[in-house]
Amino acid sequence: MSPSLPSSLPRRHWLKAATLSTLAMTAWPQAARAAACDDAANWIPPDDFLADLPRLMQALRVPAIGMAVIERGEVVWARNLGVLNAETRTPVADDTLFEDASLSKPVFAYLVLQLADRGVLDLDAPLVHYRRMDYLADHPWVNLVTARDVLRHSTGMPNWRKDPANEKLVPAVKPGTRIDYSGEAIFWLQLVVETLTGESLDASMQRLLFGPAGMRDSSYTWSKDLAARSVYGHRAVDDEETGMPPQMLRDTWNAAQTVADRWGKPLSAWRYEDAARVLPEVQAITPKGLVNWPGDILANAAASLRTTPTDYARFMAVMVRSERAPWQITNATRDAMLTTQIDVPGRWTDKGLGWNLEATPRGPVFYHSGSNGNIFKNFALGDLRGQRALVALTNAGSGNVLYRRVVRAATGHDLLAFDL
């Protein structure tokens, strides 16, 4: 049966939407499905699915995909396919970097919990006790926001302000009463971490997580080397515009890099005060409206992480591995990270600390998706009980259709998150 679509859609939109729906709903081969649904089987995508993957990428206009699989707490498989840029056709390589978008958030959450375990940060203390930014509204609800609220998305704050240069940040509801997905709250917590550590986000990440975990190709910021190895984002298959879309972070980072070179301080070392200081210089060399406030040219814990698929898999291995190294969060803290942190009746998915949680017929899983500018789409899925995980990173707006097929073929999980 054809999917039901609104009759008001013009025919060309209907045809494109129908194509996407058909690709999303077509079942994978029976043998592959049977293997994927066997909990004793691994999560490496079946060979027949991988053989068909280039066809799917072409149909969905996804130039590149990177995937990695963790079994028994170890990275056992990785594969990069396609090109960095559909126009230049430069092929991806093992060290190609993908823009992780909101997959940045769980990684940052892990750092925050490391600091909590060390007594540097109290998850339940109001953030204003550590740092109150001048762009926060003078409202009593602002004073109630805690790190726990930020990581479980119960601050009541918006995802992103429309006019951050002039608009104050304020919760829409009392913190702790409902779920409001908020990148703004993550960014504020990032600035709290800057205050507590006395260093940039990237410096803290390299010291506390990336270095110990062996994540050698991971950064929340930008450099000429990172630029050369990073994929470009591409339009979704139903986008009627042509040509390369605006590259968002790449565009702002390249402008900031020019000033960083002149200033003699790498972007990886910038803190909020640095970005505020050079903001007029960056605005002077960029189109009006591209860079509006310091947050546009600073590493962003909510959205700017870039990694190889293997590096992100190394983080997922840390999440699911049973053995614990001294630098890792405690088992009790990891359990809290993967346990429901706020009770909102009627939800089909729950919020842990940095992760979404879903109870499936085959046991609980944790996951997160990522989308930047509708030109990068990513997904990470973990099973703590099975010590396994899967990462899929793409560089196109239709990458979400593709990564859902990867997850279904490899794991047998058909999450509610894919449909609701």
Image (cartoon, helix red, strand yellow):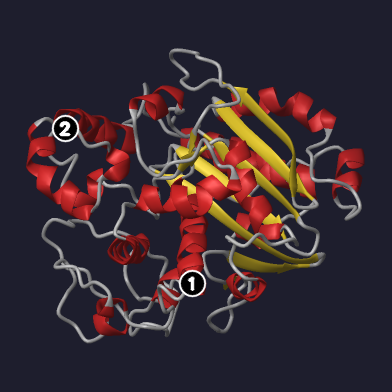
Residue 13 circle label: none
Q: Quadrant of the C terminus?
A: bottom right
Does residue 71 sit above or below 196 in this rendering?
A: above
Q: Position of residue 282 (x, y in %)?
A: 13, 36
Residue ID at (27%, 47%): 298
Q: Position of residue 103 (x, y in %)?
A: 51, 51
> Counting residues from the N terminus, which is met first, the one under dot 2 or under dot 1?
1
Which residue bears the numbered disc 2?
Answer: 259
Nearest the viewer among 197 and 157 is: 197
Q: Position of residue 323 (x, y in %)?
A: 74, 61
Residue ID at (42%, 33%): 239
Q: Is residue 18 visible?
A: no
Which residue bears the numbered disc 1?
Answer: 118
Label 2 with label 1: CB-CB less than 8 Å = no
Residue ID at (7%, 42%): 280
Q: Left or right: 403 with respect to 289?
A: right
Question: Residue type at mark 2?
Answer: Val
